[in-house]
Structures are given as structure tokens and as C-alpha cells.
Amino acid sequence: MKAFFLPVFILYASFSYAQQEKARTGTVYTTAEKTALRISENGKLTFKPLKQPVETQVCIFVDPSKTFQSVTGIGGSITDAVAETFAKLPKASQDEWLTAYYDKRKGIGYSLARTTIHSSDFSSGSYTYVQDHDADLKTFNLAHDEVNRIPLIKKAIASAGGKLPLYVSPWSPPAWMKTNSSMLQGGKLKPEFRQNWANYYVKFIKAYEAKGIPVWGLTVQNEPMATQTWESCIYTAEEERDFIKEYLGPTLKKNGLSDKKLIAWDHNRDQIFQRANTLLSDPEAAKYIWGIGFHWYETWTGSDMLFDNVKLVHETFPDKQLVFTEGCVEKFNLDSVANWSLGERYGYSMINDFRSGVTAWTDWNMLLDEKGGPNHVGNFCFAPIHADTRTGKLIYTNSYYYLGHFSKFVSPGAKRIASSANRDKLLTTAFINLDGKVVVIVMNKSKDTIPYYLWINGNAAETTSLPHSISTLIIE
């Protein structure tokens, strides 16, 4: 019954909207540089007839009856660094942080989370859950995570209203399972340990669930083509395909975990089509794969973000989901936390990722300290919120607000709807929530103030996009 009700409701909301928007009004919420606006209400919308705009009229065109992918959720990652930083804060700041991220009314209403399987670079040191050379995993235990990370994830779930889909990702197998005998500097999983490593995922998922933390999904390997100074492990496309179809997929199934969403790739957009095509063209691998994950770091080559590659995967494999699994701004500098380009990178990526077919979007670290860590190899980065552990105060970058223009207003189950702009200075995407509310997001990266019309089915409302701003327009 549920599967029948959702499409009918969306269809009804979309078609009935055509008769209603003339009588409806809307509200505009904006974050803008050189103003005090931070997801602040700054205007009302009144629709009037405008049958055919002329070319001199700047417009955002929206059609709620043309729907695309559903939204699974929007959120961020709870790493060891996040949990360790959180633990250093006074209770008032801890409560403020939880409200800021997970409260839908007072905060930005995150609805998705990611965490790591043992250590990543954003840990205070490398560690695993078993003793060296314990191939049978008899010593597996979560003692490390029970200190900071598990308590924080439980608080996050409670703050999100008792439900927070969580997916998990490994950065490296234990050193003794690898060809280079190190968790760092790449290396590969030794063939003789492929089954043991598959068992390790199962151990982790079941151990977390035994602690009262449901696991929604998992990725196969974080950044499988990057040899990093931190925890990393290399898989070619063929190696990842074979590990999934011969070991990880069957092992999840055998252990009653077939319902977990298995996400492959989990690396940049540059090679996403080559990887997805190799994995998903093999039916025996594809049957285990729910979706393809990706990051935004292809820009290290000097390239722009390669959204067309994501769109090509969506067009080629429309039955598989696309998940943005990680992104952050690197090379932290405390003097740059007010830099407006931080948030604009998020807005640019999110608008274009959703337009390319993405169903879920996950930020990297949700909280880091005043040094951009902790990070055990010095890979210090920006987060939407930093904590000055010397004072116990939180520092909000504009990334937090840019993220919030999506997560606060676009609810799980929403469908993306058709939207377009007739000027390249305005970027846009739009959604219709399950309650029928239309959410239109408009971003302006230019220095210009741009008046425009929000046009829907022959009716339009006049509004203005401020310089270097992002706005969410809610039509009820």
C-alpha cells in the first residue's frame, strides 16, 4: 500500500498544483554575503498571470508536474575527529551543535549520516577492531568507538527524532591483510584475505546494530584509486567488481544483510563512468550494488567539477542510485573561516549534483577544531562548523548555511522537479515535498543584484537575487 500511495500522492500534488499556484503565495529565505541574512526570511511571493515572458525578463522556470529522482537524505559524516572535538566542548556547546545540525525547526534538519569502519586520517591515530593476524576476527571489539564516536552517533539519532540513516565506509583493511603491510600509502588487499575482509564488514555492522545503531548502508572502499599518506587501499575497477560479486555481496546476503544499501566507487567524478560501467555491466556484481558514490576532489587536477560524468552514469544505469559521499575544502586556515567561497563551493556542487540525478548528499566532517583536525597525518580541512576548543565556542562558516538551504527544506521522499534559469548567473534546482510544498533553490555567484520572476505554469512572482547569495523559495 505504501509503494502505491507515494506515486499517486506526488502525481496529485503535481497536477493539482497547476490549478492552485495563482492563489498561492510563497516565502523566500536567503543567505547573502555582506548582510546579516543567514537562512533568514527576506521576502514574500505573490503570483500573478504572466503567460509568455519576453527575453528581457529574467526568469526561473519551474514545472512541478515534471518529476525526477526521489531524495533519500542530506547530511554529514561523524568521524573520530568530529567525536573527539565534540567531547572537548562544554555541554551547552554540545547541545547547540546537535540542535544546529539535526533540529528541523531551529537548525538545518540533517537526515543522513556516514561514519568510518575503524580509522581514517581524521582520527588521532591508526587502529582496527582486531588484534594483528586474527584472521577469524575472534578479538573483534568496538572499545575504541565506545569512548567518543558511538555516544555521539546515539545523540545524533536522538536529536534527529530517533531516525537517522547511517552508512559506513572503510579507508583500509588491517595492515596484515595488505600487500604493503601498512594501513597507509595505498597497497592492495591480499587475495587470501578477501573473505576475511568481507567478514569484517559484517562484524562491524552487526556490532554497531547490537549497540542500538541501525546501519542503512555501506560503501566498498573510500577512494579506491588514491594512494594517500593516510589509510588507503587500491582496487582497480575489475578488482572491486570481483570483490563485490565473489565475496562482499554473497557474504552480506549469507548473513542476512541484503537489505543494506551497497555503494560502490566512493571516489571522484573524473573516473565515475569508467568505474560504474565496469561494475554495473556485470550482472553478477550489479545485483548487489544499490548505488554509486562519489566525491568532488577531481578539481585537484585543475579541472572543474565534472557533473556530466555523473549525469552519464544516471542516464546509462537509471535503476541505480547516485550518492555524493564526501566533500570538503582542504588546507585549513583559521583566518579563512569567513571566506565566502567556502559555501559557494557547496551550493555549486549540490545544485548540479541533484540536477545530475543524485538522490543523497553527504558532507565530510561535521565538526573540526580550531586547527582543522584532529588528523593524524596533518591533512587539516574546513568543516561547516569549527569548535575553538580553547574557548568552547562554535564557529559557523557559511558552508553550514549553504548546506542548510537544502537540508532544512528538502525532506526525504521529496522529488526533484523541472527547473531552469534563462541567465547563467543564476543556478537553480527544485523539489516537491511529500506535503505538496514546492522548494526552489536559487544561487547567485555574481556581484550583481538580479531581479527575476519565478514562473510556474503561466503565473509568476517577482523577487530578487542578492549578490553572492543563495535563496530557498517555498511555495505552499
Image: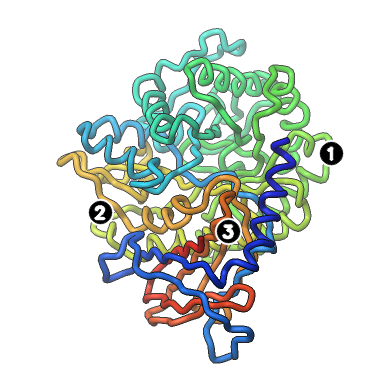
CB within 8 Å, label 3 to label 2: no
> Residue at left 73%, top 46%?
320
Q: Which residue is mark 1?
A: 283
- Of the residues shown, which amino acid type is indicated by label 3? Phe
Of labels 3 and 2, the one closer to you = 3
Of labels 1 and 3, the one closer to you = 3
Q: Which mark is residue 34?
A: none
Picture coordinates of residue 35, whole percent (x, y): 27, 69
Up/down of 98 relative to 349, above or below: above
Tell me where residue 356 sits by quadrant: bottom right
- Of the residues shown, which amino acid type is indicated by label 2? Leu
SS at badge 2: helix
Q: CA distance from mark 1 to mark 3?
A: 33 Å
Q: Which residue is mark 3?
A: 431
Q: CA distance from mark 3 to mark 2?
A: 35 Å
- Tell me if I can see residue 251 in this picture: yes
> Residue at left 64%, top 56%?
13
Q: Which residue is mark 2?
A: 334
Of labels 2 and 1, the one closer to you = 1
Q: Nearer the viewer, residue 476 or 421?
A: 476
CB within 8 Å, label 1 to label 3: no
Picture coordinates of residue 223, whole percent (x, y): 57, 43
- Tell me if I can see residue 294 in this picture: no
Residue found at the far top of this picture: 138
Q: Nearer the viewer, residue 150 or 116?
A: 150
SS at badge 1: helix
